[in-house]
Image (spheres, coloured by chain):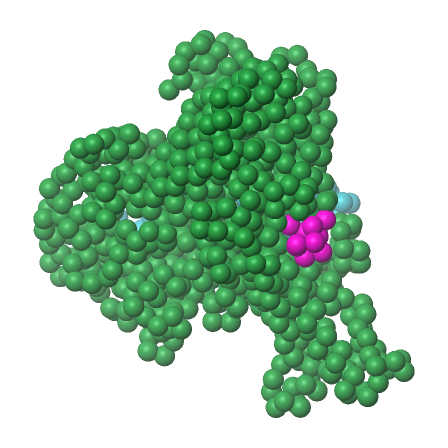
Chain colours: A cyan, B green
Amino acid sequence: MKQQIIMFQLNGEPLEIYADPAESLLAILREKLGLYGTKAGCGKGECGACTVLVDDQAQNSCLIPAGKVQGRRVETIENLSRGDVVHPIQEAFVEKGAVQCGFCSPGMIMSAYALLKSSPQPAPEDVKTAISGNLCRCSGYKQIEEAVLCAGDKMKNRES
Amino acid sequence: MIRSITAPDPKQAPASGCFPGIDYDQNPEVWAKAAGRAVYGTDLKMPGMLYGKILRSPCPHARIKKIDTAAAEAMPGVRAVLTGEGLGCKPFGIVVDDELPLAVDRVRYIGDEVACVAAVDLQTAERAVQSIRVEYEELPAVFSPAEALEENAPQLHRDFPGNVAWQRNISRGDSEAAFREADHVVENTFTVPAVHPTYLEPISCVAESDRCDGLVLHTALQSPDSVRAIVAKVLELPLSRVRVIGPVMGGGFGGRVYGNLKLYILSSLLAMKTGWPVKMQLTREEEFTVGRPMIAAELKMKMALRSDGTILAREAEIITDNGAYSAQAPWVSNTISERNDSVYRIPAVKTGVRLVYTNKVPTGQYRAYGNQAANFATESLIDMAAKKLGIDPLDLRLKNCIREGDVSVHGLQINRCALDECLKAAAKKIGWDRKKAGRGYGLSAAIHANGSLIFNKKFRGAAAQARLELDGRVTVFTGEQDYGQGAHAAFARIAAKALGLNPDLITVQSRDTMHSPYSLGALAMRQTTIGGKAVQLAAENLKEKIVQLAVSLSGEPATMENGVVRGSSGMVFDLAAIAYDYHSQTSGLSLLGEGKYVPEKSDYDDSGYGNISVTYSFAAHAAEVEIDRDTGALTVHRIVAAHDSGRIVNQVSARGQVYGGITQGLGMSCYEGYLFETGRVANASLADYKIPTALDIPEIEEIFIENEDPAGPYGAKGLGEIVMVPVLGAIANAVADAAGEWVTDLPITAEKIYQAMAGWECQ
Ligand code: FES
Ligand code: FES
């Protein structure tokens, strides 16, 4: 398809790119914008490694045509930390041993982030459901679930 | 809301209770991973980099009559096109030499590499590959070992008549007499499909070639030194002109011990031809269709017992399905054929194993090397015997299980072993004595080697270096790889303990073959025990040198305790000052501790008898399941995992290994397995090849029986592979307990359970 201008908000900043609107958001993020934190495990919506937030919803960026984010808010893993300062979810993932090879971690953390945005104190079952589209081959998910619950507590404690 | 990335203050980290005073649980790299900043192979991009793509055979077996690459070569943006003709490479392999980088004359499976191109971008490379015209003459193909073993079957490789790639017959003790004298004989046939390690990051490689640095491969491998040696040999390059640098690894599980050799060789050839870096990457579909799954196996097995439950002998006929080329399949077949015999005191065994070529995806290996496939068969058979003899499966296991001081039927020396305790602990925790109605319970036991002499009889150990840096920090160099299992964090702890330093002051380096000591790598569960011991020795050696230097500097006796170097007069030496002094004295050298762990010579002989490893880990798992009697649907409620892996170095990552390994075992038990349609992989996607998701995980409870083993560093031994082994037998036996009948064909699906309950023949 012909390239066109696509405007959206990326990690809190307005952005204008010239791209094929049929190209996946994942390819745009990685290849055009150099944001390699979002991972590609299958390119077909089957693994969740490419999860980003579009208007606060966790989505597989490999399935989203770039044209579809016109005018919307996109948030990637890169937005969760600044220098040495990390988000409580990331802190909890490290503390609980939820990061092994780490390839699923950015997508997993973004799914957790979307969950905690909409439901700050989730039940263990909600956590399982929220990450059920994110495959992890290393961890058996248990320490990831512990981390998400712990992150919820951390965020609450720090707000109060 | 936010805290610093450098936050983990060692003093505040949760106490693991392992190494008093030293509590630091994570490799610092996890911060980068969690932040999305870790650079994996698939993320690599280099100046001038080209993209490579492979043309693959659409036929399961065919003669190549003609390849026309003119259109590809004329395409703008295409920088190189290669075909097998004219490459002049000799056949290569890991155990047997049966592969070429690109097919010459003949293709042997759907996916076989026929040609490859390098182009300025991936789209151009894909278009170029599609423009290559190949004329094939289809040949008759064989899709199962049974077909391949028929007398007039098409032959896949001239050098391997009868389509047998490898075989072995093992006979120990007098099993014929045992079967004659036995009160009872149980027998059955078990089948296990090919399974893929399914690491989440597909394999990729960037190859660079130039006059100055030689050939450099950027790819994450569990055994970079082994791959380096094969690539050098195939390309006829001096070994020192091939270097492997590893980016962060997105999972391995045995699948990245050798990774995808074709990909490394072809990207190297394209880089050498073009003079530019070339990146190649498998798609997820290619991972399934040309990656290297673990071999499928059929195990025909029988066991002789006395009425009191004493096992007298076991015999097995095993056929493994190699696919078109061999990779590590001979070694995996070997583990399948014998390792489980050493779980129990079995006086006599007789086993034949044959690895058979078929026109299907070539096979490799997976975590635990086939030990888990054999566990499914042998542990099911144990329970079948228990049922026949009317003995409790726990009692039957306790009566026969191997114990400390034993020498197993294959000559394994069992010096430290808490298998009986593992069995008792797992049974107790699952509630063996108070089983719930409507639930099924199963047990299973396992042994796994810590390093194996099968790879290289002369190379038994590992080496490491510990260097005192000018700032007083320590860098440990090891060839042992960390793919997220926590090896480097463990090594940092081990070195820290030897030196009395905080692990925060220790950096572990392993990812560059130019700088790390040679190593067999992350395989056969040798990391902690063998690699870790070498790190301990290197750190101890460094400590000695530090103290010696302090003595010569001060002219008085000195000691190093808790990381502080002190002379007898009370004078304290700063580590940085010691490093700097040595550096000045020698005009630039660094103080370097070296450690080599060379295990005692083993009696392991050419017949495969003898002590194959420095030590062994043990485990018993128990499962609690429920079956819907109307549909056969299976719910695995709980798995209890009791492990004797010696002293646990790091509780957090040990738990992670247990949960992850059990989840993979659950996948292999209940969901996973290749499906083929006339040689084509029918489930080549993550949607069709189902691995467990967060919704599939049972309650998992781990028990560590910390039976310290002097063979490993501070009493520790391996855990990463054995965690996947007993879960298969435990689930199979729990299903049988609930259904009244065994499912002998993996994966154990609702349909098969339903058929077993209805008394139908499985399959
Ligand atoms: S890469 Fe998008 S779901 Fe796998
Ligand atoms: S940590 Fe490796 S896939 Fe999740």
Question: What residue lies at 76% left-to-right and 45% top-to-bottom?
Answer: A157
Q: Which residues are magenta?
A: B708-717
Residue B249 visible in image: no
Q: Is residue B337 depicted above or below B41 in this figure?
A: above
Q: Is residue B69 left or right of residue B247?
A: left
Residue B168 visible in image: yes
* Quadrant occupied by the C terminus of chain B: top left
Q: Is residue B59 magenta?
A: no
Q: Is residue B366 depicted above or below A78 in this figure?
A: above
Q: Main secondary structure of the magenta part?
A: loop
Question: What residue lies at 51% left-to-right and 35% top-to-bottom?
Answer: B173
Residue B527: % across, % down: 58, 55
Q: Nearer the viewer, residue B43 or B215?
A: B215
Q: Is residue B498 left or right of residue B269?
A: right
As drawn, the residue found furthest toward the right would be B569
Residue B713: % across, % down: 68, 57
Question: What residue lies at 56% left-to-right and 15% top-to-bottom?
Answer: B388
The tally of labels here is: 0
Q: Is residue B587 left or right of residue B207?
A: right
